[in-house]
Image: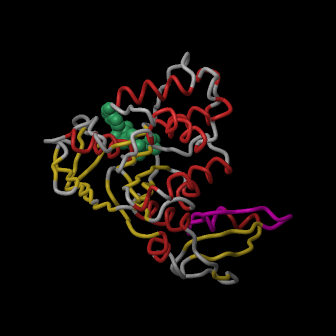
Amino acid sequence: MKLSINNISKRYNKEKYGLKDYTLTIENGILGLLGPNGAGKSTLMKIIATISQPTNGTIELDGHDIQKDPDFIRKMLGYLPQDFGVYANLNAYEFLEYIAAMKGVGGPGLRKRIEALLEGVNLIESARLPIGAYSGGMKQRIGIAQALLNDPKILIFDEPTVGLDPEERMRFRNLIADLAQNSIIILSSHIVSDIETIADEVAIMQSGILIARGTQHEVIKLVEDKVFETLLDNAELSDFKAKNLVVNTSRQKDKVWVRYISNDAASGSKPTPASLEDAYLFITHKNN
Ligand SMILES: Nc1ncnc2c1ncn2[C@@H]1O[C@H](COP(=O)(O)OP(=O)(O)OP(=O)(O)O)[C@@H](O)[C@H]1O
């Protein structure tokens, strides 16, 4: 499958753009949308999910214009919105049966499918509790389950890992990894570590604009040979920060260890392998 986003803009009001002339082609696999708060990730996801209209541009799924024919994508869509609301009085079975009815999913296999999904998101033991009694992470997981209910070929998860502990994050990764062979999976986050263990490719956006895109390896390459570590006196730190892009520090008695990105290493520094987080900070800083 191929989803082509062609020169999409979303203008919310006179001076506020959610997206500006955004172009991206997405094929099967897991794409991580990374960007700071307000970058336009939710705006893009809502437009792909056809619950918001762009001001300009088109989106095509395998050549079908999804604004002209929204049902074409809706039929194969699973969507977890950022502000996912649940029905507090329903238990997990009742909630998923309700969503299934809304999506037109039914048949004798439905109960089995719901149980398999509840196993998949590790909620089977709490499935008879009202969702109102769930923790934030459990609500997020029931949200993930409802997005998967109709066996979607396009999956859009807006900040799916919010509230998930490392074990649940791994479970989420495993749950979607198999689907990624035959589906387009798009997930967003502003936290690099949430994406880096999950996504095959990343698209970094800022202020409504796509600023980098590629496999994690390709994006990391943008800062290869630019990441260094050094040990400074505490008193030197603020001056050093003013001149360099410092990505991490840690106090060590009277010294401070500093990880930074620069074209030229300060004396006494040693080069260190770059990470996706380094690349993200470098790219978003450069475009600020
Ligand atoms: N309904 C709206 N009316 C006006 N401006 C909006 C509206 N929705 C979003 N925006 C603005 O559009 C920009 C992009 O917002 P969006 O929610 O898409 O970003 P995001 O990357 O998802 O951010 P976050 O990580 O905080 O969820 C922001 O500046 C936001 O304030």
Query: Where 141 falls versus 129 (above or below)?
Result: below
- Side (left or right) of 267 relative to 27: right
* Residue drawn 27% across the image and 56% down it: 3
* Residue drawn 38% across the image and 42% down it: 78
- Side (left or right) of 133 relative to 12: right
**Nearer the observer, 237 or 60:** 60
Q: Quadrant of the N terminus?
A: bottom left
Instruction: Indicate how the structure is coloured in the image.
Output: secondary structure
Report if residue 252 lies within the magenta region. Answer: yes
* Residue drawn 63% across the image and 24% down it: 128
Q: Quadrant of the C terminus?
A: bottom left
- Side (left or right) of 15 relative to 127: left
* Residue drawn 45% across the image and 34% down it: 110
Residue 179 location, x and y as percent?
Answer: 45, 55
Residue 74 location, x and y as percent?
Answer: 28, 40
In which quadrant of the rendered view does residue 194 lie? Answer: bottom right
In which quadrant of the rendered view does residue 165 lie? Answer: top right
Residue 164 location, x and y as percent?
Answer: 62, 43
Q: In the current view of this chain or complex, which residue is farthest to the front?
A: 108
Q: Which residues are magenta?
A: 238-255
- Side (left or right) of 162 relative to 27: right
**Nearer the observer, 217 or 249:** 217
Q: In the current view of this chain or complex, which residue is farthest to the right?
A: 253
Q: In the current view of this chain or complex, which residue is farthest to the top?
A: 89
Query: Where 9 falls versus 265 (above or below)?
Result: above
Is residue 170 at all visible to an observer of this figure? yes
Report if residue 170 lies within the magenta region. Answer: no
Residue 185 location, x and y as percent?
Answer: 41, 53
Query: Where 30 falls versus 119 (above or below)?
Result: below
Numbered-mark total: 0
Is residue 38 at all visible to an observer of this figure? no
